[in-house]
């Protein structure tokens, strides 16, 4: 009877202790589960900033955002280009009208005026050699040598723009005029004081210079004009485009 009285109190004490222990454990676990990520100790911290669970986006959300937002420099550049194209272009300021002289372009339907009137002292000949009195030899000649007294005025054969004013030992002082459509004329053996400058617009009949002393390479011809015509840089017989002089 004494043993029973001792046994039951011991059992009750053990059960009570177990219940207390279970309660303590449950309270401990509940407190552990409610600990915020910011409270992780140094051993658990990976170096990343703590983020609460309700702030973490799902993989589906991240994938959707990646598909709708630029993720690299190329896409951002493309967006910038599209935005730039959509912006209205700045209006350019209207240029002031230039008072440029007008002239008629030369073509196959037109004829040129004779730059000077005179006798042909050396004809155009590029296929057959002709005698050159100054050099005392036969040679081809790509110009029309027209005799004229010193200081005789030389006129532009057609409308055009002065392309070059030059000098060399063979041709003396020269003026080249561009008539458009590939046509050009050159006037050589002029005086040094020509009447035109490069870039100047001239009309048919305008005085561009005067006959000067012949160069040492054409001295035997006397004072004259060396007149050349070219089309697309190819030599042309001036007589085929010059107007027919009245007899």
Image (spheres, rainbow, N blue to C red):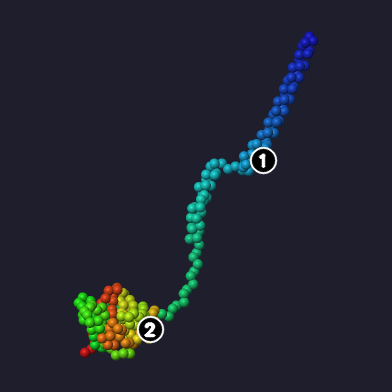
- Residue that appears at 34% across and 80% down: 168
Residue 104, visible in the rendered structure: no
Mark sitting on residue 193: none
Viewer-proximal residue among 184 and 149: 149
> Disc 1 or 2, which lies upstream in sequence?
1
Left or right? Give the position of 224 relative to 64.
Answer: left
Left or right? Give the position of 65 relative to 223.
Answer: right
Tags 1 and 2 touching, CB below 8 Å: no
Viewer-proximal residue among 81 and 209: 209
Q: Residue 17 at x, y = what percent?
A: 74, 22
Image quadrant holding the C terminus, namely: bottom left
Image quadrant holding the N terminus, namely: top right
Q: Residue 236 at x, y = what percent?
A: 25, 77
Displayed quadrant of residue 204: bottom left
Q: How far apart are marks 1 and 2 (CA)?
A: 91 Å
- Residue that appears at 36% across and 82% down: 202
- Secondary structure found at label 1: helix
What is the crowding at mark 1: few (fewer than 14 residues within 10 Å), some, or many (at least 20)?
few
Q: Residue 59 at x, y = what percent?
A: 54, 41
Viewer-proximal residue among 216 and 96: 216
Tell me if residue 7 comes above or below residue 120 in the rendering: above
- Residue that appears at 67% across and 37% down: 41
- Residue that appears at 53% across and 42% down: 60
Displayed quadrant of residue 32: top right
Farthest top residue in view: 1
Q: Residue 156 at x, y = what percent?
A: 32, 84
What is the crowding at mark 2: few (fewer than 14 residues within 10 Å), some, or many (at least 20)?
some
**Residue at mark 2:** 196
Residue 20, visible in the rendered structure: yes
- Secondary structure found at label 2: loop
Mark sitting on residue 38: 1
């Amino acid at each position: 009877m004494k043993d029973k009285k001792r046994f039951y109190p011991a059992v009750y004490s053990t059960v009570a202790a177990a219940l207390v222990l279970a309660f303590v454990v449950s309270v401990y676990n509940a407190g552990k589960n409610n600990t915020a990520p910011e409270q992780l100790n140094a051993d658990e911290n990976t170096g990343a900033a703590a983020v609460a669970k309700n702030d973490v986006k799902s993989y589906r959300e991240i994938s959707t955002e990646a598909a709708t937002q630029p993720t690299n420099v190329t896409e951002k550049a493309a967006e910038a280009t599209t935005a730039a194209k959509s912006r209205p272009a700045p209006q350019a300021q209207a240029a002031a009208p230039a008072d440029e002289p007008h002239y008629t372009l030369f073509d196959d339907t037109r004829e040129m005026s004779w730059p000077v009137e005179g006798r042909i002292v050396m004809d155009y000949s590029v296929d057959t050699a002709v005698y050159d009195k100054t050099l005392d030899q036969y040679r081809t000649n790509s110009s029309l040598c027209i005799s004229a007294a010193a200081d005789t005025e030389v006129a532009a054969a057609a409308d055009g723009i002065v392309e070059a004013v030059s000098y060399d030992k063979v041709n003396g002082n020269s003026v080249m005029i561009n008539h458009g459509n590939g046509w050009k004329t050159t006037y050589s053996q002029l005086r040094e004081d020509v009447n035109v400058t490069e870039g100047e617009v001239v009309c048919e009949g305008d005085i561009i210079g005067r006959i000067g002393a012949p160069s040492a390479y054409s001295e035997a011809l006397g004072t004259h004009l060396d007149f050349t015509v070219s089309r697309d840089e190819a030599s042309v017989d001036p007589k085929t485009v010059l107007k027919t002089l009245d007899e």
